[in-house]
Amino acid sequence: MKYISTRGAAPVLSFEEAMLTGLARDGGLYLPQSIPHMSFAEIAALDGQSYEEVAFRVMRPFIGDAFTDDEFREIIARAYAGFGHVARAPLKQLDSAHFLLELFHGPTLAFKDFAMQLIGQMFEASLKRSGRRVCIVGATSGDTGSAAIEAFRGLDAVDVFILYPHGRVSEVQRRQMTTPTESNVHALAIDGHFDDAQARVKDMFNDFEFRDAVGLAGVNSINWARVLAQVVYYFTSAVSLGAPHRAVSFTVPTGNFGDVFAGYVARRMGLPIDRLVVATNQNDILHRCLSGGAYVPDGVIPSISPSMDIQVSSNFERALFYAYGEDGAAVAQLMDELKAGGFHVSQGALEALREAFASGRCDEEETRATILQTWAGTGELLCPHSAVGVKVAEEMRRPDVPMVTLATAHPAKFPAAVEEASGVHPPLPERMSDLYERSERVTRVANDLAAIETLIKERTAH
């Protein structure tokens, strides 16, 4: 299995190389040259299997010879051993044909744990074998950072630097990043919003002298291995609801497009997905683009669902690559136009996107109302991001097709917003009950590439 860049001008890599590289050297994102297909019988045979076994069967065709079967099974087992639910990604029923996929039973209470715990184990195995050391730099709107720090803390061959927007993440999200004591992990609070943090990370990857000097690697959703790990729970949930004998729909609250793109990959692999719905909050650039074809950032408005407060959705580039018939030059042109202020999707590509994705939006009051209504009607407390998904799913679902809404975070990660909406304070799980008492370790940084690179060089001088 070989991997190519969405912009068509970077070296073709193996899975292991693409995983350790992150962003391609032409600025693009890696994708498999072809997406493996699972037959009807192979999908049906997943019924009743453990999450770990499904993960092995779904991901195995993508990893080539990076790991032996036994190594890969061990990596998967270690990755999910610390989850708080034996099913890993259990389904809860909200209504007659509406289900909630709980993706918050990992160590940092968010869906990012599914990918990050796996990547941590894969990086560790690969780096031990090669004797290499890498420096992971990532940007986060809240959940990726804590999941990355949790996955890589204390590992010998990795330094981790996570940039998050100062004052724009929840207290729980911040504390999960700033309270680990291991010396190889670093939380950096950047002056600005998430798109600034994400832009500085991309700048570092495009500064080849710096990139090579520190051994830069990325674990943001630009990393293909992140997307691949998220493909698995589409299969486990759909098969639980009758696939491949019946189609299932999914609604995904998303800002950076990685989680919903994983659903697109699952569909391309043969999973019968009826509708794949993109749910956005008031920062609705993805909904606006899918509705009218214009992708023009117009500023981030802070919300109670901060992990979705994004205007530049990195993984949308992967969807554009397929919408434009795998034309890397066309994608590179669009990304150049985005730097200059925005772009318009061609009519043919827009039709391809609409064939693959539906979309909807949910404002602040609708988010609060959904949290309250779901609590009153089902006894389920939703985090604000999950509430965005539930509201849009209710508008988009069809009575004869099960709809699965991805619950992307535990409500206790956003206690103030949840309590304001529902009147109920969501407690942290017992294993995290002392989070507010732990001391914090954080560095405030300017939105300045040179200053950030200097800090990273100083801290990685081993």
Image: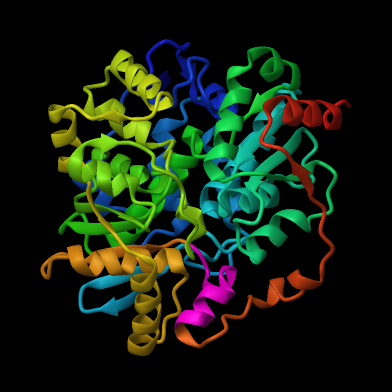
370 w.r.t. 43: above or below? below
Residue 414 among magenta residues: yes
Residue found at the very far left of the displayed protein: 400
Q: Residue at x 38, y 27 (%)?
A: 338
Q: Quadrant of residue 123?
A: top right
Choose between 145 and 227: the one closer to the eye: 145
Image coords of residue 62 (percent x, y): 42, 32
Q: Quadrant of the C terminus?
A: top right
Horizontal arrangement in the rendering, residue 358 relative to residue 375 (left or right): left
Residue found at the very far right of the displayed protein: 462
Q: Residue at x 46, y 45 (%)?
A: 229
Image coords of residue 198 (percent x, y): 55, 37
Q: Is residue 241 visible?
A: no
Q: Quadrant of residue 67?
A: top right
Residue 24 among magenta residues: no
Horizontal arrangement in the rendering, residue 442 relative to residue 447 (left or right): right
Q: Residue at x 42, y 21 (%)?
A: 3
62 w.r.t. 3: above or below? below
Q: Which residues are magenta?
A: 409-421
